Image (cartoon, helix red, strand yellow):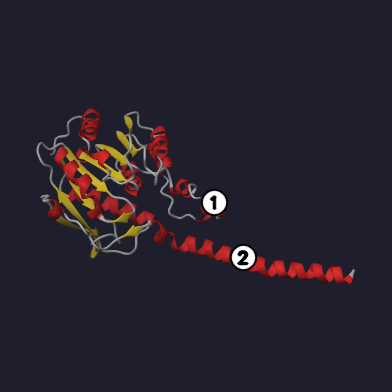
Amino acid sequence: MNVKIYRSLGKLTSWWRWGKWVTLVYLSICLSLYLCQERLIFKPQATIKTTPTDRNLVHQDVWIPIDQKSSADKLFGWWIPARGKKIGTILYLHGYSENIGKNLDPADRLSQLGFDLLLIDYRGYGKSIGEFPFERQLYADAQVAWDYLVKTRKIDPRNIIIYGHSMGGAIAIDLATRQPQASSLIVQSSFTSMSAMTDRYWWLKLLPIKLLLTQEFDSLTKVRSLKLPVLYIHGTADRFVPAEMSRALYQATFSTNKQLVLVANAQHENSSPEFTTLEHLEMITQFVKQSVGIIKQQ
């Protein structure tokens, strides 16, 4: 009997030792995810590989102070004027990786449609000066860019279209909830929330993500308060963010002036050729004209 008890105690001790280390590793992973999730989510690059000059695009380099009382942190961006008859002004908010240099394809085609564009890099991206980004900071940077258009360039808010791609779509939705006087909102290839994105990876389900997640990007909740015209665009071949997420955003959007366009065979990248067809570009133009009228720059 004593031998059996001794063996049982030995097994319990062995399990305790292994369990202790497994628990320690698990808790360490949770703590690292909680403290360092920005580094896992955002992938900024300082080097701008392609500029408007490389595309023969007329443009102006723009530096926007984040705090008017201090010149320490600044946003860098490009002002690209419309070619041909001007329709309106787009504030373009890019996705989680690289910088504005990766977004010249959509900038080029939107300029051809007749839109002035402001492309900005968030703090930590490209030439913009500031610490590594996090969610609330990205929202603040979008607001700074909006204020630049309205206060510095004196553009009527009713002439400004907020356009966001991927993570930029979540930032655009947040900005639109705070600037309902904007002309309209265009959200391309974006997601419902960061929590929903983590649900797509089985190994993350082993962690208490909802307790650990500080970068929420809860667009699904925010769209319920949108009242301005909204256009959702998503590629059916998007493997990074499923098109069902744009459908869910569309269904949850409060605005009665809303559209959902699913582009056959288009992938996640905004440079996907299916997004450059004449039919697709005309759809964007018609959305602006039909939803808010032909916008006249003031």
The amino acid at mark 1 is Lys
Please tell me whether residue 153 is drawn above or below residue 129 in the rendered image: above
Residue 150 shows in this picture: no
Residue at 22 percent across and 45 percent down: it is 106
Quadrant hosting residue 288: top left
User: Which label belongs to residue 205?
Assistant: 1
Left or right: 282 as drawn, with respect to 266: left
**Secondary structure state at the residue bearing disc 1:** helix
**Other residues around mark 1 within 10 Å, as few (<14) / some (14–19) / many (≥20):** few
Query: Residue 123 location in percent, x, y?
Result: 29, 60
User: Which label belongs to residue 22?
Assistant: 2
- The first of marks 1 and 2 along the sequence is 2
Query: Residue 266 location in percent, x, y?
Result: 32, 39
The amino acid at mark 2 is Val
Q: Nearer the viewer, residue 115 or 74?
A: 115
Residue at 44 percent across and 49 percent down: it is 194
Quadrant hosting residue 258: top left
**Secondary structure state at the residue bearing disc 2:** helix
Q: Residue furthest right?
A: 1
Q: Quadrant of the N terminus?
A: bottom right
Residue at 57 percent across and 64 percent down: it is 27
Q: Quadrant of the C terminus?
A: top left
